[in-house]
Amino acid sequence: MKRHLISAADLSVEDAILILDTAEEMSQVASRPIKKLPTLRGRTVVNLFFEDSTRTRTSFELAAKRLSADVINFSAKGSSVSKGESLKDTALTLQAMGADAVVIRHSASGAPHRLAHSGWIHGSVLNAGDGTHEHPTQALLDAFTMRRRLAGAPDGGPVPHGEAGDGTGRDLAGRRVAIVGDVLHSRVVRSNVHLLTTLGAEVTLVAPPTLLPIGVESWPCRVSYDLDEVLPKSDAVMMLRVQRERMNAAFFPTEREYSRRYGLNAERVARLPEHAIVMHPGPMNRGMEITAEVADSARSTIVEQVTNGVSVRMAALYLLLGGADLAASDSGR
Amino acid sequence: MTTSQTTHLIRGARPLGGAAADVAVVDGLVAAVGDGAAAAAGEGAHVVEADGLILLPGLVDLHTHLREPGREDSETVASGTRAAARGGYTAVHAMANTFPVADTAGVVEQVKRLGDEAGHCDVHPVGAVTVGLEGKQLAELGAMADSAARVRVFSDDGKCVDDALIMRRALEYVKAFDGVVAQHAQEPRLTTAAQMNEGTVSGELGLAGWPAVAEEAIIARDVLLAAHVGSRLHVCHVSTAGSVELIRWAKSNGWDVTAEVTPHHLLLTDELVRSYDPVYKVNPPLRTARDVEALRAGLADGTIDAVATDHAPHPAEDKECEWAVAAMGMVGLETALSIVQHAMVDTGLLDWAGVADRMSFRPARIGRLDGQGRPIAPGEPANLTLLDPAYRGTVEPSGFASRSRNTPYRGMELPGRVVATFLRGRPTVLDGSIA
């Protein structure tokens, strides 16, 4: 494993499967009476959040605590500049405090890359979402969820809705994933395209042309403007949140039109293959990109994704911080 | 003949890259070139051994940010002009986006006076087109033209004069004193929150794109406006292949349109932004390899008139941060000639006479400067730059004369070194150091 987790593009297929398999082991901890491992005892993990994100921060915090790390939540709302302290100075402070890992969420694309590669800090850097760039642990938890649902049966096939299988050792070869909505502003998409294609899945992005980035044709995925055409050929459909302020910037005419063309409702879900699942990274706009009926259906993995996020983040922290080596020394091997 | 500080014999240099010749400099003027030079300089002259070196007319920059008044932490007129002399420049145009903005006779005269006092090179202030660079009301262009600074170049650089009517009026008004409007072509609505060139790389990096058409749309409009009112338009820091085509088209129609390109746009591409290192963050943004190729071709065939540095100094803290909040710009005065040699001369696209044309003759004409951008000939002002083209060295910003170090070339090996610079016969740089 590399020292940092900045981009899903940095992960080889072996790395990705190692993280997912480790997450499968970590998920067992959650079902124990005492949900804790001593693995990262004495290590310090800093959650450095320049942007509000209760869900992601809590998930990382829980993951670190389940591994017995000391966790510091360093909240820095707004940009570092508006706060009067630069990212560099913040990093130097954390370095002085002896942070072994920094989990960073930032509104600026590239901020985690900058933190990891500028020599300001010696510990591992985990990207918890940067601007419209990447969110690699989100992609890992999505892939983990897909693997359990679509390749979790003993024969490597899909499991019945509502059940979660065990996909240990498997990739996502041949699985077809549609990602729908605001691709342009989504860090989740960029990470998912990298990771899912690394794992062998075929990804199709579905969005109005205004919400697709220039140059998307060079990405390792297909692009469509027509959701209805894509759905019957999808094993998983991942809906993205659409921010209402996009309407003011003329990305689409009205919410109503967006919902009509790109929203997921029961009628559209019926076009999916029987085994197909519905995903959403959250938070959802119910009634906009997804109806409540679909979000709460048995096909939906939205709640599972949150649960799986903790396991995946435990795995990432464990592997990046040399958890395997620590465990070996703890046991006297 | 008595020894005089104003008498120099530059021995064996190659004027404009041509045949080796001695050049005599006496009392601020080129006294003789060739056979009679030694005699003209006399026995006591200060001798500059220049065997194999290239002698160019003193370089003229149409686009320098000296930051004074207001941001003296980044640069001052004194430090910026020292950097200019080190880069071989004998004249620079100081952009108007200072604090306060150079939109009155008082500010431009102050900048001119600071330049005169420093004495490293001539400083020609650029006047703002509109009050406060706000694009709403014309600044007192005539007062700046009539001032001691004799302003002839007007620009809201850093911002685009995007209101078509204001731009038309500015173009018309400056005709009264043979001025030129230098436009920063950037359609603001198409570049809201833009961070880098819009293209494949921006899509992958998740940085808001800055489309080529935002520059090209303004250039297309402005060349038509300039043609309509019969005025002079100069386009600042052209960065796209489409812009080159538009300027080529305007010139083919006989319109009085000129353009400049920066050294960095002749060399660097948006692929470098993958490092997220703000040293590559610049306005306009670094474009694609295809754009670089078109810019080089445009400069070579004369479509683009001038190389201009867009020297934009920033203190370290404005660059040691996240990409999104970092300041835009890079320093350029001390590396410009090396980059042009690397990108244009060593590639065979431009000879040294061409370099003299694009970095001295034409920019001086665009700025309507007297005494700059003149031939190396008897009777002409001795504004001269002596370059060692065989030199190869690694860029080390700590040695810069500029107050700022925001260069993208740190650690890069580049050709060429300015050995000496003469301002009206007085060395401002000798043996590569400030004289």
Image (tube, coloured by chain):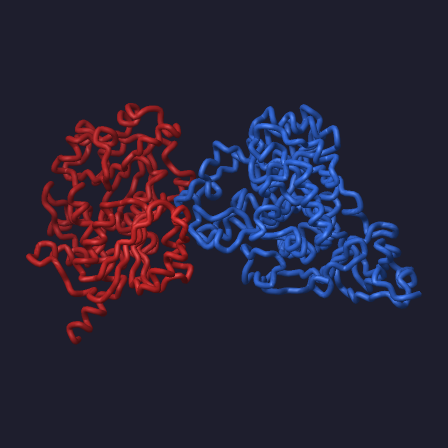
Front residue (pair A299, A175): A299
Where the C terminus of chain B falls, by quadrant? bottom right
Chain shown blue: that is B
Q: Residue at x 18, y 69 (%)?
A: A327
The image quarter containing residue A268 is top left
The answer to whether one can see residue A330 in this image is: yes
**Position of residue B104 measured from the top left corner of the image (x, y, whole percent):** 66, 36
B316 up-or-down from B171: above or below? below
**Position of residue B366 measured from the top left corner of the image (x, y, whole percent):** 72, 39
The answer to whether one can see residue B346 in this image is: no
The image quarter containing residue A163 is top left
Q: Residue at x 14, y 49 (%)?
A: A152
Front residue (pair A149, B415): B415
Q: In screen coordinates, is A141 left or right of A182? A: left
A40 up-or-down from A295: above or below? below
**Position of residue A266 measured from the top left corner of the image (x, y, whole percent):** 17, 29
Chain shown red: that is A
Q: In screen coordinates, is A277 left or right of A50? A: left
B222 up-or-down from B5: above or below? above
- How many numbered marks, from 0 up? 0
Where the N terminus of chain B falls, by quadrant? bottom right
Residue furthest to the bottom in view is: A332
**Position of residue A146 measured from the top left corner of the image (x, y, whole percent):** 20, 46
Q: Residue at x 42, y 50 (%)?
A: B322
